[in-house]
Image (cartoon, rainbow, N blue to C red):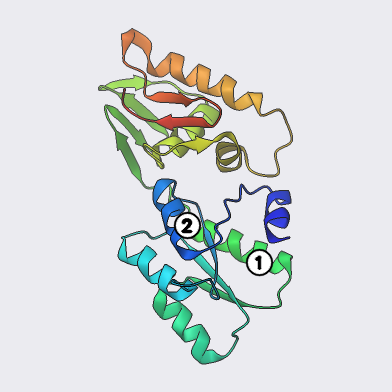
Amino acid sequence: MLRRGLALAGYEVRPALDGEVALQSINEQPPDVVVLDVMLPEPLDGLEVARLIRKAGSDVPIIMLTARGKLADKMAGFASGADDYLPKPFELDELLARINALLRRRAPQLVEKLAYADLVLDAATREVWRAGHFVDLTAREFDLLAYLMRHPRQVLTRGQIFRGVWGSEYVGSSNIIDANVSYLRDKLEAGGRPRLIQTIRGVGYALRQP
């Protein structure tokens, strides 16, 4: 039910039935947020999973769900690395509001400068250079490239890109992603420069050096 509710809200959900599967999934494809139940099958409960996520150096937002609502339980959740703690029973709308709040808090500020390979993107001035040459992009092309550069080497699904660049409230064809990737490639690959935006067939795209 939770997976269906999150999917209907526009999120791509990758469920994991135990802690070991969750850690493997997070390592292989880092998510934007982790919704973590405390009561998981042995050998790892939710508190230990959160600790291991933080021990690995990940700062992914973690929301813990649990029937344990006492102050001591909440303190244990925060001590293990959780960013938020939602006792059961809860309303889906409240969970969605907390997820959105964490994602807004995590959103990079416009003062950042991003670099990958020979690409440099200045979020403050909204300028892009490749190999020292200025690349003139439209506003949407810039936002698309910025999203890819914030997730270098990661395989991003079309759903993730759609939400990250266009927003879940956008109504339109997902083909717009492919079109904008094509326009962006034309500009970035001018002069015979190698391709950096790679197509991952059946999944989406990744910013990777060939």
Q: Is residue 92 above or below residue 210?
A: below
Looking at the rendered structure, the secondary structure element under dot 2 is helix
Tell whether 208 sits left or right of 158.
left
Which residue is more in the foreground, 108 or 38? 38
Residue that appears at 43% across and 68% down: 49
Which quadrant of the figure contains the N terminus? Answer: bottom right
Q: Which residue is mark 2?
A: 21
The earlier-in-sequence mark between 1 and 2 is 2
| Residue 126 picture quarter | top left
Residue that appears at 25% across and 22% down: 132
Q: Which mark is residue 188?
A: none
Q: Position of residue 95 (x, y in %)?
A: 65, 66
Q: Position of residue 154 (x, y in %)?
A: 41, 39
* Label 1, label 2: how far apart the Cα atoms are: 23 Å
Query: What kind of residue is marked 2?
Result: Val
Q: Is residue 78 above or below residue 33?
A: below
Looking at the rendered structure, the secondary structure element under dot 1 is helix
Q: Which mark is residue 95?
A: 1
Q: Is residue 64 above or below residue 209?
A: below
Residue that appears at 53% across and 71% down: 41
Tell whether 156 sits left or right of 166.
left
Which quadrant of the figure contains the C terminus? Answer: top left
Q: Is residue 32 above or below residue 47?
A: above
Marks 1 and 2 in Cβ contact (< 8 Å): no
Query: What kind of residue is marked 1?
Result: Leu
